[in-house]
Image (spheres, grey):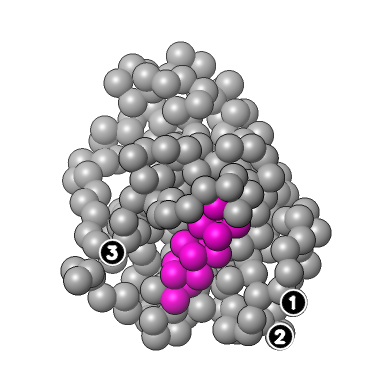
C-alpha cells in the first residue's frame, strides 16, 4: 500500500521519481525522450489521449484541456526521471502516473521487442509542503542533468559554473531551459509557478547557480521518498 495521500491543493507539491528496473536505461535514443515528453502532455488531460505526434508539434489549448496535474518541472535521465507535480483533481497524480507508466512501457516494449515491467516498482513520491523545499526542488530536479556534465559533481565542486549552467540550458530533456528563458517544452509545464516564485529567468539562474555552488547548504534535510 502506498504510504502517502495526494492532496488537491495549491499549497502542496509532490516530487515524483522512478527509475528503470535493475537500474536499466529507459531512454535509449532521442525518440524515446520525445515520446515520454509527448506522454507528459497528452496524458495530462481527462479526455482520451490523441495519437502520438512529435513533441515539437505540440500545441496547447488550455480552454479545451482539463488537467489532472500541473507539471512544474521535470528532468529525464537515461535510467530515471524526476517530476514536480501539483494535483488538480482528486486522484489526479495516481491516474496520471498510471497512464505514463503503462503507456510508455507499452511503447518501449513494442519498439524493443521485449516484455515485462520497465520501471522499478511503483513511483516514489515526496510531499513538498514548505517554502524552502518549494524553491529548492526545481534546482534539485534540474541539476540531475549535471551527472552527464561532470559525473563527480556531487562529491567535488563544479570546476566551471558558467559551462555547467550553459550545459543545463542546452540539455533538451528537462524543463531547465524553459526556466532559464530558452523555449523548449513550454506547453508541458506551468509557467505560473516560475513567475510566482522567481519573477523572471535571471532570478532563477542566480538561485540555480547558488544551489550548484552550495548544494549541501540547500539540502540540509535530504528528501526521503515514500511509496
Q: Quick one: quadrant of the C terminus?
A: bottom left
Q: Is residue 100 magenta?
A: yes
Is residue 173 rendered to the left or right of residue 26?
right
The numbered dot on residue 127 is: 3
Q: Which residue is mark 1?
A: 61
CB under 8 Å between callouts 1 and 2?
yes
Q: Residue furthest top?
A: 159
Query: Dividing the picture into quarters, in which one does residue 51 lie?
Result: bottom right
Query: Dividing the picture into quarters, in which one does residue 212 lie?
Result: top left
Q: Residues within 10 Å of mark 3 (few under 14, many from 20)?
A: many
Nearer to the camera, 160 or 63: 63
Q: Quick one: SS at disc 2?
A: loop
Q: Which residue is mark 2?
A: 64
Q: Magenta part of the protein: which range?
A: 95-109
Query: Dividing the picture into quarters, in which one does residue 180 lie?
Result: top right
Label 1 vs label 3: CA separation? 29 Å
Amino acid at each position: 500500500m502506498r504510504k502517502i495521500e495526494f492532496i488537491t491543493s495549491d499549497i502542496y507539491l509532490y516530487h515524483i521519481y522512478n527509475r528503470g528496473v535493475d537500474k536499466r536505461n529507459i531512454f535509449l535514443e532521442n525518440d524515446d525522450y520525445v515520446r515520454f515528453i509527448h506522454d507528459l502532455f497528452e496524458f495530462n488531460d481527462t479526455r482520451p489521449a490523441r495519437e502520438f505526434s512529435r513533441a515539437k508539434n505540440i500545441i496547447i489549448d488550455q480552454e479545451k484541456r482539463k488537467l489532472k496535474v500541473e507539471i512544474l518541472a521535470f528532468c529525464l535521465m537515461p535510467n530515471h526521471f524526476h517530476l514536480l507535480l501539483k494535483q488538480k483533481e482528486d486522484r489526479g497524480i495516481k491516474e496520471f502516473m498510471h497512464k505514463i507508466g503503462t503507456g510508455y512501457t507499452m511503447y518501449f516494449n513494442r519498439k524493443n521487442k521485449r516484455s515485462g515491467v520497465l520501471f522499478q516498482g511503483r513511483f516514489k513520491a515526496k510531499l513538498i509542503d514548505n517554502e524552502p523545499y518549494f524553491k529548492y526542488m526545481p534546482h534539485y530536479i534540474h541539476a540531475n542533468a549535471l551527472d552527464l556534465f561532470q559525473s563527480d559533481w556531487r562529491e567535488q565542486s563544479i570546476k566551471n559554473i558558467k559551462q555547467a549552467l550553459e550545459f543545463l540550458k542546452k540539455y533538451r530533456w528537462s524543463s531547465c531551459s524553459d526556466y532559464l528563458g530558452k523555449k523548449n517544452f513550454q506547453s508541458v509545464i506551468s509557467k505560473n509557478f516560475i513567475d510566482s516564485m522567481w519573477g523572471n529567468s535571471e532570478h532563477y539562474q542566480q538561485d540555480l547557480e547558488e544551489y550548484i555552488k552550495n548544494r549541501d547548504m540547500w539540502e540540509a534535510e535530504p528528501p526521503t521518498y515514500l511509496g
